[in-house]
Amino acid sequence: MRINSFSILVTTAFIGLNSCQYNVESVLYGTSDCPPIEATYQMHIAAIIESKCEGCHSGNSPSGGLLLTDYDYVVSASAYNGLGERIQLPLSDPNAMPPNGGLSACDVEALLDWVANGTPFE
């Protein structure tokens, strides 16, 4: 069986282009221009969630049925609803959050570090 070189090239390019979903340079390369912090919900995360997420994820009909109005809801979203993954998706992905791209690289890094450190409250 002879394999067409063009088919191999196209397949390799397709896999390569679709294999990387993260769009946060500090996550990809481990370098960051963000100030080093030990993020806690009370000191850092609550402000990010309030300014970037609660507009859609609060009230009687939160977007996607996901409330992000207090610590317990945000912890649950990070553990069971893929919050960490969704905030890293490229804006071209329909599952990217927030859909307007409102999170800075430092916000994303703070949220990911917070989750990695066990979602501390204080």
Image: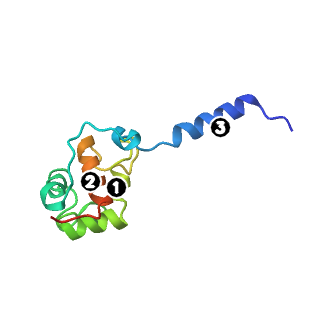
Q: Secondary structure at mark 3?
A: helix
Res 102 visible? no
Distance of label 1 from label 2 (alpha carbons): 7 Å
Which residue is at a point 58% across and 40% down the rendered structure image?
15
Res 35 visible? yes
- Quarter of the figure that contains the N terminus: top right
Residue 115, how many percent across, how many down? 30, 60
Q: Which residue is mark 1?
A: 84
Residue 30, how many percent across, how many down? 37, 41
Residue contact at pointers 1 and 2, CB within 8 angstroms: yes
Distance of label 2 from label 3 (alpha carbons): 35 Å
Left/right placement of residue 15 relative to residue 28 reads right
Q: Secondary structure at mark 2?
A: helix
Q: Which residue is mark 3?
A: 11
Q: Which residue is mark 2?
A: 111
Left/right placement of residue 12 relative to residue 33 reads right
Of the pair 86 and 112, the residue shown nearer to us: 112
Quadrant of the rendered image containing residue 64: bottom left
Give, as a three-letter code, the residue at label 1: Gly
Left/right placement of residue 103 relative to residue 87 reads left
User: Which mark, residue 40?
Assistant: none
Give, as a three-letter code, the residue at label 2: Leu
| Looking at the image, residue 110 lies above or below residue 42 | above
Sequence order check, earlier mark of 2 and 3: 3
| Looking at the image, residue 65 lies above or below residue 27 | below
